[in-house]
Amino acid sequence: MSDDSMKEAVWAPEIADLRRRQELAREMGGADKVAIQHSKGKLTVRERIDSLLDDGSFRELGSIAGTGEYDASGHLTGFSPSNLLCGRGRIDGRPVVVSGDDFTVRGGAADASIHEKQIQAEQMANELRLPIVRLIDGTGGGGSVKTLETSGYTYIPANPGWNWVTDNLRTVPVVCLGLGPVAGLGAARLVSGHYTLLLRDKGFMFAAGPSVVSAMGTPVTKEELGGADVHARCGSVDDLADDEEDAFAKTRRFLSYLPSSVDALAERVPTDDPVDRADPWLNSAVPRDRRQPYKMRRILDAVLDRDSFFEIGRAWGKSVITGLARLDGWPVAIVASDPMIYGGGWTADAGDKLTRFVELAETFHLPVVHFVDIPGVLIGVQAEKAGTLRHAARAIAGVYQATVPWCNIIVRKAFGVAGASMTNHTRFRYRYAWPSGDWGSLPIEGGIEAAYKKDLDAAEDPVAMRQDIEDRLNAVRSPFRSAEKFAVEEIIAPSETRALLCEFANLAAPLRRVGRSSFGFRP
Amino acid sequence: LTIYRQVWNCSGGLEATMSNVSVRSDIAGLVSRIEVAAGAEVATGDTLLVIESMKMEIPVEAPRAGRVEIIHVGEGAQVEEDQLLVTLVAS
């Protein structure tokens, strides 16, 4: 619109006023606060949104919401914007909702926010069936106890918009980025997502910060209390980002594997990776010596679409590897044992991680491929005290409740209750085993002493007898004996794996069903 | 300026302060073999020691190239998750 037409327009003064208010809001907490944000090596919330979204795609809601100051005649003299921005935009061309804390206004504290904006952002994502990305950089819901003096009363706390926050976990992809110090309500918003990460060195998260904790008697630094590595290693967040650009790149990548909501299916992308690419190295990937582990991630890279594996949660529950990937272009959920960590045995954390990942796959209709090398649930005093059995049982319940297409590749071991839970065995067993397959209720190693105790105790030469028993049992341990009885459906050369998995992905694609899962997703 | 950073890889936790690299255990288990001596030069991925766990012999690998400064555990030692195993000086 030209300046001339503006001068003539009936509502020109109001439109000018609107633009002025929007200009004021874009100044955020003011030049000095913005300079402080930059001096910490942090982007402002508006720079973050611009960096995350496709160029120029941000459509803000509540752009002039905040606190105005007026003179005696009612003219606006100053303005402090609310410290949560929200709106719609696009990522790789797909619409998303974004909300972001403005740390330059009251440190992102909720006492400078307008709760309804946060609530509307969550509800918009839910009702428009759009992914939501939360850019979190700020303290808790209450701000500080000083608010008691300004409000003149206290209240029973309620978490704003939590019905939507909770419902979104079973409705739309939720990505949460911790880009600064995050405490209290902000921390709860951060961990309540499908993919959550903290920024290395700059992201911190706590129920209460170091000043509160130190005042209770134990001096602690913010790094010790809530550094990014603390939370990545215990699984409070899924991942770490090296810098903000890395955080946004990971966000875009995560969303690329998912549909926009449970009412849609994840889309295939074109690939030039041949479905019958057979890496001959795979036929030597697993050592013959059963005591020697190997690098499972190298196997994944060799069979999945080239460079398509996006690992989630690498720093915790490490005996189970989880991530998203593609097979012949179709998005799939990958579960794999890591024999370098407890031989692939399930720890309590690994059970927790698997539970949550299966819920993610089920929620967004992603077929699962599980690369199995499971010696069992972790044994020992520490493991028992960690509640490993219940965490494992929880994961098993998830596996048995899942209805998404499911495929197993038995790479090596499948023992005990955990090995038995590679799939819901009552479904069609879409399953292949490698010649390195080794399975049973109990492993021979360590099982002989228990099963043949009487004989060994009575033997003149228990060592020789033990060896003799082991040789006899090993003779029937070949996976081909199992295949003779159809106790394993099919044994394959490892180099055939990719072709079979691509076939699985193509067969599974039309079986995916939209809608809400019968069991939800919890943080 | 102290650079402090934590990285994870398959073979153990890694933390670096300047050129010192602390190799920590990813798992609890028994140190069954130590494969390097103090002063040895190692390449990324070389096995430093082996931990026995769940009937497996799990190697702890050098997260980067360098010289073995201190080996903090002996053969036969029971180690816990996150225990310091080896200090390297990165080359």
Image (cartoon, coloured by chain):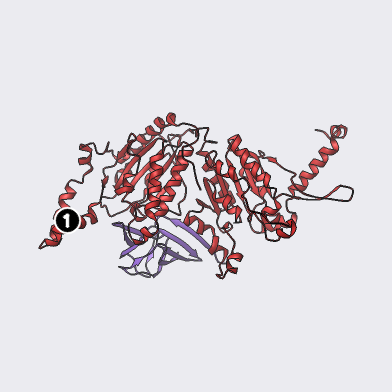
The residue under the point 60% across, 53% down is A185
Residue furthest out toward the left: A460
Quadrant in the rendering for residue A212: bottom right
Residue furthest out toward the top: A510
Residue A307 in sight here:
no
The residue under the point 38% across, 50% down is A392
Image coordinates for residue A208, horizontal then vertical, percent: 59, 60
Q: Nearer the viewer, residue A244 or A405?
A: A405
Q: Quadrant location of the N terminus of chain A?
A: top right
Image coordinates for residue A169, horizontal then vertical, percent: 53, 42
With A140 as the anchor, is A273 left or right in this view? left
With A350 as the anchor, is A29 left or right in this view? right
With A257 as the anchor, is A458 left or right in this view? left
The residue under the point 33% across, 54% down is A343
Residue furthest out toward the right: A73
Above or below, A147 relative to A364: below
Image coordinates for residue A324, horizontal then vertical, percent: 46, 42
Above or below, A146 relative to A8: below
Quick one: SS at disc 1?
loop
Chain of residue at mark 1: A
Residue A124 in sight here:
yes
Neighbor class of circle 1 (other Cα within 10 Å; few <14, some 14-19, many 20+) is: few
How many marks can you see? 1
Chain letter of the red region: A
Q: Which residue is mark 1?
A: A452
The residue under the point 73% across, 60% down is A149
Chain letter of the purple region: B
Task: Name the amino acid, label 1.
Answer: Tyr
Q: Nearer the viewer, residue A478 or A92?
A: A478
Image coordinates for residue A104, horizontal then vertical, percent: 70, 54
